[in-house]
Image (cartoon, rainbow, N blue to C red):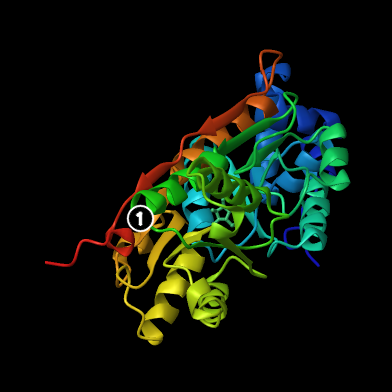
Amino acid sequence: MALKDAAVSVKDVAALAGVSVGTVSNVLNRPERVSPETRDRVSAAISELGFVRNESARHLRAGSSRTVGLVVLDVANPFFTDVARGVEDTASAAGLAVILCNTDEKTAKENSYLDLLEEQRVRGILITPADEISDRLTDLRRRGTPVVLLDRKATGRDQCSVSVDDRKGGDLAVTHLLDSRHRRIAFVGGPTSIAQVADRLRGAKVAIKRAGLPDDALTVQIMEGLNVASGRLAIQQLLALPKRKIPTAVFCANDLLALGALQELSHQGVRVPYDMAIVGYDDIDFASAAMVPLSSVRQPRHQIGRTAAELLIEEADDTGGHKHRQVVFEPELIVRESSTRTRRA
Ligand code: RIB
């Protein structure tokens, strides 16, 4: 096979230019170290042979690359799409590409992706952990890969994180329902092993306690997933309760659950908000566009992504000035038709 067709190597370029492989590497990576006439000879050989540098091999040797990993719980959830957009805007402005990994809330899948990203020597990793911070993630950091927690507050000050005060978010949602005179309220969430869900539930319970109501004023419905199908199933289960136990309002741990709840209530002829009020969480774009515009606790999704990416790049390029920061944003309750009893005009 003619040399031109084979993968041209640095050795081939060095042979044609009559220099060492190290000189070729200097021309590619540290041209200021090479005399102009040698640079020209090597450049002529590169053009003649059609040599293309192998970035990933170079980065593997150098221990860094122009990619960052973004590991999310559910790529189908618009919350993470919006966060990913913030990450990508910041990463691309810094000349970095984003490798998106979807864990489906499974630790085993998360670990597989962490192995892959470490092999790729990514510049750093942004992650919403599927559960607690795993040993795998701790090891990865210890071996030198910067990690920023997304949508999860770091427990210590030795790690960067960007999150929202989810306890306050849960409190805002249920206080709003209590202020609307609801006294039988349900919390519909996913696995409480996901800290965000557990914190929203904690906030809901704080609001119930502050109102002087007994704990059982809040029915807790923990579903397998945080998606539309789980929202529909949760409503089927709540409507099957004895009549005096059926809630008049439901706070869902995210908007996908709330959209599923709206769908099922409509399917069963239950009027929202008159027979049952609904509040979601995230305030994704579909919330305001829902058949009954959805009240929701807004998370600043794009800003979460952007801020996390900025922290990661600062840590990865650290020349000694980086200080780990745990950024916590405030949630904001957006009230729409799904939880206000005022009749439609
Ligand atoms: O992934 C489940 C939920 O956690 C998302 O909807 C978002 O609220 C995140 O915080």
Where is 333 relative to 290, above or below? above
Q: Is residue 275 left or right of residue 203?
A: left
Relative side of 123 to 257, left or right:
right
Q: Is residue 30 left or right of residue 202?
A: right
- Quadrant location, the N terminus: bottom right
Residue 235 position (above or below residue 327)? below
| Residue 82 in view here | yes
**Residue 168, how many percent across, how many down?**
51, 39
| Residue at 21% from the left image edge and 61% from the top image edge | 342
Residue 119: percent from the left, percent from the top?
83, 49
Q: Which of these two is toward me, 146 or 344?
A: 344
Q: Which of 329 and 236 is in front in this view?
A: 236
Q: How many marks?
A: 1
Tell which of 33 and 334 is nearer to you.
Answer: 334
Q: In the image, residue 50 lies at what x, y percent?
A: 66, 51
Position of 145 compared to 319: left or right?
right
Label 1 packing within 10 angstroms: few (<14), some (14-19), many (20+): few
Which amino acid is tagged 1?
Answer: Arg
Q: Quadrant of the C terminus?
A: bottom left
Occupied quadrant, residue 309: top right
**Label 1 sits on residue:** 181
Quick one: which residue is furthest to the top in this view?
321
